[in-house]
Each structure stands twice: as C-alpha cells, then as structure tokens.
Image (cartoon, grey):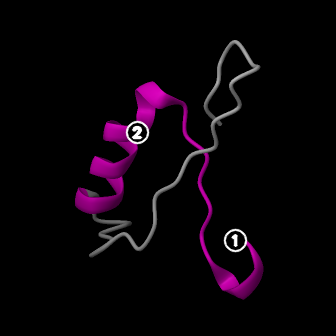
Amino acid sequence: VTCFNELEVMIHPEGIIPVLTFLKDHTNAQFNNMIDLTAVDVPTRQNRFE
C-alpha cells in the first residue's frame, strides 16, 4: 500500500496473467476493475522493463 492507500503490485512478466486472474476470480480478492497498469522502459538494461 502506497500513499493515498493505493495498492501497488510489482509482477514478473510471466506472472501478469495468473496474478490478474487471481485478483479477478479468487474469493479473497474479487477486484471488480483495474484503474491503472503501467511499466517503466530502461533501454540500457538487459531486462529493459520494470
């Protein structure tokens, strides 16, 4: 949880679909909508996206 009580989750690229599916479908989560999805591109890194 960050400022303004927002949930922030950092996910490895291969985990995006499983995590989003969990947040949508699991009885302990059941998120109804996602407000924002973003990434950071650092071209000088071997693994560019953060």
Q: Tell me the distance, in whole angstroms, between the alpha carbons under discs 2 and 1.
A: 19 Å
**Secondary structure of residue under mark 2:** helix
Name the residue nearer the viewer: 14 or 41: 41
Query: Could you tell me the amino acid type at mark 2?
Result: Ile
Location of the N terminus by quadrant is: bottom right
Location of the C terminus by quadrant is: top right
Query: Could you tell me the amino acid type at mark 1?
Result: Val
Residue occupying image coordinates x 37% and y 66%: 28
Of circles 2 and 1, the one toward us is 2
Badge 1 is on which residue?
1
**Secondary structure of residue under mark 1:** loop
Residue 14 picture quarter: top left
Q: Which residues, given as a range, are shown in magenta?
A: 1-25
Specify whether 1 is left or right of 31. Answer: right
Residue 27: give x, y in percent of width and height: 28, 65
Residue 30 picture quarter: bottom left
Image mark for residue 16: 2
